[in-house]
Image: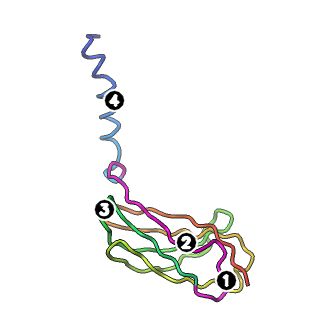
């Protein structure tokens, strides 16, 4: 193999791999910054959550959905709502049946750049 061809081989291989990836995988992802007081919401008391959604300095618009997971399995899907200017705010209520259960709240955030999720461990108490 010619010397310059050997130098190009790794570059060509990297380019081929990049072209094989879907466009969403190549796009720079956006950042989720949670502002959640704790991991122990009180049953039947509003538990506020805020998430900043940005891509660099750009504040994004989008929507949110929730999944509640128990031992890695989704046990509930819940609607969220839309958000603008990079800030999502909501309050959640945990029912009495959730008391003492170790759950994972999965927050699914969708923007024009795709969907990302944030997992937050919670155990509701009385």
Q: Residue under circle 4?
A: 13
Q: Main secondary structure of the magenta part?
A: loop
Mark closest to the chain's N terminus, 1 or 3: 1
The first of marks 3 and 2 along the sequence is 3
Which badge, 2 or 4, is on the more N-terminal residue? 4
Q: Earlier in the sequence, mark 1 or mark 4?
A: 4
Marks 1 and 3 in Cβ contact (< 8 Å): no
The Cα–Cα distance between marks 4 and 3, rounded to whole angstroms, is 33 Å
Distance (Cα) linking label 3 and label 2: 28 Å
Q: Is residue 107 left or right of residue 25?
A: right
Q: Which mark is residue 83?
A: none
The crowding category of the residue bearing disc 3, from other C-alpha atoms within 10 Å (few below 14, some 14 to 19, many at least 20), is few
- Assess disc 1: are there few (<14), some (14-19) or many (≥20) residues with their C-alpha within 10 Å of its C-alpha: some
Would you name the residue on which mark 2 appears? 67
Q: Residue at x 44, y 64 (%)?
A: 32
| Residue ID for mark 1 | 42
Q: Range of the magenta residues? A: 25-46
């Amino acid at each position: 193999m010619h010397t310059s061809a050997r130098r190009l081989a790794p570059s060509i291989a990297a380019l081929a791999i990049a072209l094989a990836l879907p466009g969403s995988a190549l796009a720079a992802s956006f950042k989720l910054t949670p502002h959640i007081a704790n991991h122990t919401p009180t049953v039947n008391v509003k538990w506020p959550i805020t998430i900043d959604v940005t891509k660099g300095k750009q504040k994004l618009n989008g929507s949110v959905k929730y999944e509640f997971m128990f031992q890695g399995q989704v046990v509930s899907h819940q609607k969220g709502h839309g958000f603008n200017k990079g800030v999502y705010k909501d309050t959640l209520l945990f029912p009495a049946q959730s008391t003492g259960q170790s759950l994972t709240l999965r927050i699914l955030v969708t923007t024009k750049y795709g969907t990302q999720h944030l997992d937050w461990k919670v155990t509701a108490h009385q």
